[in-house]
Image (cartoon, rainbow, N blue to C red):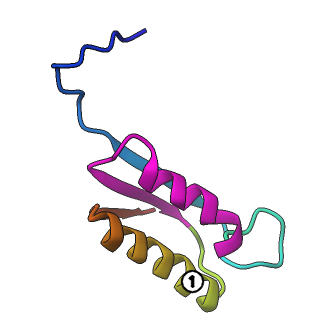
Amino acid sequence: MKRWIPFVKSPPTVAVLRLSGAIGTGSRGALSDRALAPLIEKAFKRGKPVAVALEINSPGGSPVQSSLIGARIRRLAEEKEIPVIAFVE
């Protein structure tokens, strides 16, 4: 367990959001804006990250859902002034 010392800076944190699967709303386990919204919001809030990293492993899918997910990430990145880095497998 780490000890909290008020005058010592904590190391910077990077939130990692792993997105794996097809993008869409139809099948179980599909990546959709509704399913990912709480995870995306949490990534930008938790521990004041210096950056958010997206680890994406997807064969593709719905362009509408892709646009909604991307718009949510961009909006939060601009509001919170946190850079987003995407890694695609």
Say how many tags the image has.
1
Circle 1: element type:
helix
Residue at far front of view: 6
Q: Residue at x 77, y 78 (%)?
A: 25
In the depicted structure, whether residue 33 falls above or below residue 16: below
Give the x, y percent position of residue 45.
Answer: 44, 51
Give the x, y percent position of residue 22.
Answer: 67, 72
The answer, for residue 46, to whether it is visible in the render is: yes
In the depicted structure, whether residue 1 falls above or below residue 66: above
Magenta residues, start to end? 32-57
Residue that badge 1 annotates: 68
Occupied quadrant, residue 54: bottom left
Packing grade of label 1 (10 A; few <14, some 14-19, many >=20) is some
Give the x, y percent position of residue 77.
Answer: 35, 68
Residue 22 falls inside the magenta stretch: no
Q: Residue at x 83, y 78 (%)?
A: 26
Occupied quadrant, residue 36: bottom right
In the depicted structure, whether residue 32 falls above or below residue 62: above
The answer, for residue 32, to whether it is visible in the render is: no
Tell whether 54 sits left or right of 82. Answer: right
Give the x, y percent position of residue 43.
Answer: 47, 52
In this view, the residue in front, 33 or 86, is 33
Q: Residue at x 45, y 44 (%)?
A: 46
Three-letter amino acid code at disc 1?
A: Leu
